[in-house]
Image (cartoon, grey):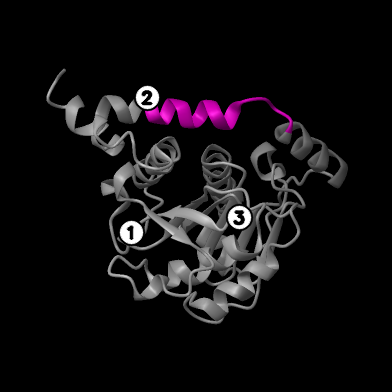
């Protein structure tokens, strides 16, 4: 057994190890995509049926340093969480704790301040029109938060959770803030976050041309959105290839 493999294998008995690996991979690749924000922003993943026990990144650690073993295992219903020595970032607890406490369908939650999604969230009109196939993916599947009230401590987190009660809404465009994406798994949420940032980039750059936009009809946009939802295996393949690349280049993420 090589010296590089041995230290990693000792972590494979950690609770929810495969879920930890998936989430750690998402952190690492998000940093590679330059969608991270210094040592801020957070991803979380529910690991019980009720959705109240969840993995999340530790307080103020760069995404590119996250490992499977470094993820916190938290209980959204534990009032003592913020009193523990390894307490999470208080805004992460406020936002992600609230969502996992109230929304069992939000299995994986990813919040970033990625550049183009945040530009979109900063516009007076933060809608994403279906100007191409990627943008159409999100037709009628996002909600816009127009009530930003400051850092996402518990009151703000509870307010945001209420905006995501409709299970059709898989993306929240957080006005004056960033974007929050939910999914059924790490692969589902990560793929959605990736494509939302790509869609926002396309739209912002289209606006920069100053020319009239070619917007799809509602019927076609909805058809595309449904076709993408029913397209088999893309999210899982996306994350699998990300993990393969990380195992080649950054295998310490497994530890």
Residue 66 falls within the magenta-colored stretch: no
Q: Which mark is residue 244?
A: 2
Is residue 206 or residue 133 the one in the foreground? 133
Q: Which mark is residue 58?
A: 1
The Cα–Cα distance between marks 2 and 3, rounded to whole angstroms, is: 36 Å
Is residue 73 or residue 200 the one in the foreground? 73
Question: Regarding mark 1 in the picture, which secondary structure is present there?
Answer: loop
Of discs 1 and 2, which sits in the foreground?
1
Read off the magenta span.
230-244
**Is any atom of residue 113 visible in this view?**
no
Q: Position of residue 248 (x, y in %)?
A: 28, 24
State the residue lying farthest toward the right.
219
The Cα–Cα distance between marks 1 and 2, rounded to whole angstroms, is: 24 Å
Q: Magenta: predominant secondary structure element?
A: helix
Task: Name the residue at 63% across, 67% down.
Answer: 161
The residue beneath circle 3 is 207
Q: Residues within 10 Å of mark 1 (few under 14, many from 20)?
A: many
Q: Is residue 186 left or right of residue 131?
A: left
Task: Name the residue at 30% across, 65% down.
Answer: 86
Q: Is residue 224 above or below residue 31?
A: above
Q: Position of residue 57 (x, y in %)?
A: 37, 55
Report the quarter where the N terminus lies: top left
Please give the count of numbered marks on the rendered protein.
3
Q: Is residue 40 left or right of residue 166?
A: left
Q: Is residue 139 above or below residue 174?
A: above
Q: Residues within 10 Å of mark 2 (few under 14, many from 20)?
A: few
Question: Regarding mark 2 in the picture, which secondary structure is present there?
Answer: helix
Q: Position of residue 200 (x, y in %)?
A: 57, 51
Q: Residues within 10 Å of mark 3 (few under 14, many from 20)?
A: few
The reply to whether dot 1 and dot 3 touch (C-beta < 8 Å) is no
């Amino acid at each position: 057994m090589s010296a590089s493999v041995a230290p990693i294998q000792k972590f494979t008995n950690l609770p929810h190890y495969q879920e930890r690996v998936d989430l750690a991979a998402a952190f690492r690749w998000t940093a590679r995509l330059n969608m991270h924000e210094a040592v801020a922003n957070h991803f979380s993943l529910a690991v019980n049926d009720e959705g109240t026990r969840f993995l999340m990144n530790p307080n103020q650690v760069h995404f590119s340093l996250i490992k499977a073993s470094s993820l916190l295992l938290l209980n959204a219903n534990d009032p003592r969480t913020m009193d523990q020595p390894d307490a999470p970032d208080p805004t992460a607890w406020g936002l992600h704790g609230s969502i996992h406490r109230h929304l069992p369908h939000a299995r994986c939650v990813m919040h970033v301040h990625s550049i183009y999604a945040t530009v979109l969230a900063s516009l007076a009109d933060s809608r994403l029109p279906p100007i191409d196939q990627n943008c159409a993916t999100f037709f009628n599947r996002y909600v816009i938060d127009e009530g930003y009230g400051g850092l996402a401590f518990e009151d703000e987190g509870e307010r945001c959770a209420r905006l995501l009660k409709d299970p059709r809404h898989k993306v929240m465009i957080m006005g004056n803030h960033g974007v929050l994406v939910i999914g059924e798994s790490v692969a589902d949420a990560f793929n959605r976050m990736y494509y939302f940032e790509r869609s926002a980039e396309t739209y912002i750059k289209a606006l920069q041309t100053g020319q009239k936009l070619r917007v799809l009809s509602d019927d076609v946009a909805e058809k595309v959105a449904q076709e993408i939802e029913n397209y088999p295996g893309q999210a899982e393949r996306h994350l699998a290839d990300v993990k393969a690349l990380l195992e080649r280049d950054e295998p310490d993420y497994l530890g």
